[in-house]
Image (cartoon, rainbow, N blue to C red):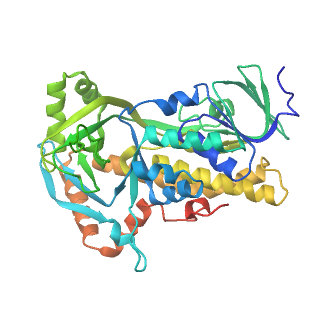
Amino acid sequence: MSPSPDSDRIDLAVIGAGLNGSLLALAAGEAGLQTALIDRMPLTSLAEAGFDGRTTAIAYTSQRLFKAIGVWDELEGHAEPILDIRISDTGHDGRTSPLFLHFDHREAGEGEGEAAPMGWIVENRFLRAAMLRRLQACPRVELVAPDEALDTSRSADKAEIALKSGRLLAARLVASAEGRFGTMREDAGIGARAWSYDQIAIVLVAHHERPHRGVAQEKFLPGGPFAILPMQDGEAIDGKAGEHRSSIVWTERASIAIRLLELDAPRFNAEFARRFGNFLGHVEPAGPRWSYPLGLIHAERYVDERMVLVGDAAHGIHPIAGQGYNLGVRDIAALVEVLVDARRLGLDIGAADTLERYARWRRADNFTMVAATDLLNRLFSNDIAPLRLIRDVGLASVNRIPSLRKLFVRHAMGLGGDLPKLIRGERP
């Protein structure tokens, strides 16, 4: 017999156990909120999956949140620090402009202590497994998976979620972490600005002859950005050192990307190597290729009665700056702080004024990043000669001004704006 709504009352129900949903459930549970994490997939299957080529860029401030909730100790040994970022422009002929922009993590340092990396690259399999272990050990979090939210009804005092298993779950607040294509936002009548870039991102791992030394490269090609992100070396085999590896996010116009993905391995590898260049010696793709269409989506509002949107459910941006996941992390830190503050004051955590504080806090930061990534992609994803000259001169000009470089580095690390406590490495 399923529990009644009254006896099954919780603080927060999170729909979707992806990287954002799992992190929200864990951060809320660690902060003392009774939380349920609901997903149609068995969570152990996600954590037990082998390496599939996908990685996540974790900014410096996001790392502080992971450390505050006890996840980073498990991840640190699998995380490759980003020490430098080099941005350059490359034309149809494959030649890279001599004008470039170089960021050094030491430029953002304060005082005499060792400067922190700008971020880290972590394989998704390690990130999922570390979060699942912490979720399973958190007494305030119930893992409701595999199960599915078939219907959600919300009223002035509660939200009720009817599950496929027959269970009826009542919560003070429900959070949609379903991603860009979840149904809760549409069911709530929340519109969104959305458009396609007519681009496809090809995601893979490259093995290369020489070490990357913690340097991330962003090469702007006519079809879109080509990101080379430093990964830990592969596992050593038979006493031999592991392969030097980088994670690749290769953006192309959709029509070209489709043709590239249809090529046999030798021809695909040749096209890849031409774009990658020879600065790390011989290079070739390794393992599977992933691809997904690129677009922008930004919800008109982040909250509704007893409901809140986080991560890609609220905003999905171009990967040009590698900040999509980190925006979601800041959403989570702000939401948990708002909910904990409300509960501490004896207020209703699902009340409209509580949720509006979260929406006001996050909207400006998110809108700024949505607009910036959209503008950068439009500015750099072309081979128009006057625009190439303007952007190359712009990159070189910023490169010559230390104060501007420091400003950009600190923003890449997530150090701008009104930071929630978890992002500062503190408990809410």
Q: Nearer the viewer, residue 425 or 397?
A: 425
Viewer-proximal residue, 94 or 29? 29
Locate residue 103: give its quadrant.
bottom left
**Residue drawn at the location 24% of the way across and 29% of the way down:** 256
Instruction: Left or right? Give the position of 61 relative to 191.
Output: left
In this view, 197 is above or below 26: above
The answer to whether residue 301 of the structure is visible from this angle is: no
Whole-percent x, y for residue 37 in the image: 66, 36
At 39% from the left edge and 61% from the top edge, which residue is drawn?
Answer: 118
Q: Quadrant of residue 163?
A: top right
Q: Quadrant of residue 311?
A: top right
Q: State the quadrant of the N terminus.
A: top right
Give coordinates of residue 347: x percent, y percent: 83, 55
Q: Is residue 182 above or below residue 97?
A: above
Q: Quadrant of the C terminus?
A: bottom right
Observer-nearest of 47 and 362:
47
**x, y (%) of residue 369?**
47, 53
Rendered position, 60 above or below 208: below
Name the foreground residue: 423 vs 30: 30
Which residue corresponds to the image point at 57% horizontal and 53% vertical from the top-left? Answer: 70
- Left or right, 347 with respect to 60, comes to right
| Residue 426 image point, x, y percent | 61, 64
Q: Is residue 7 above or below residue 426?
A: above
On screen, residue 278 versus residue 187, left or right, reads: left
Image point (40%, 69%), residue name: 407
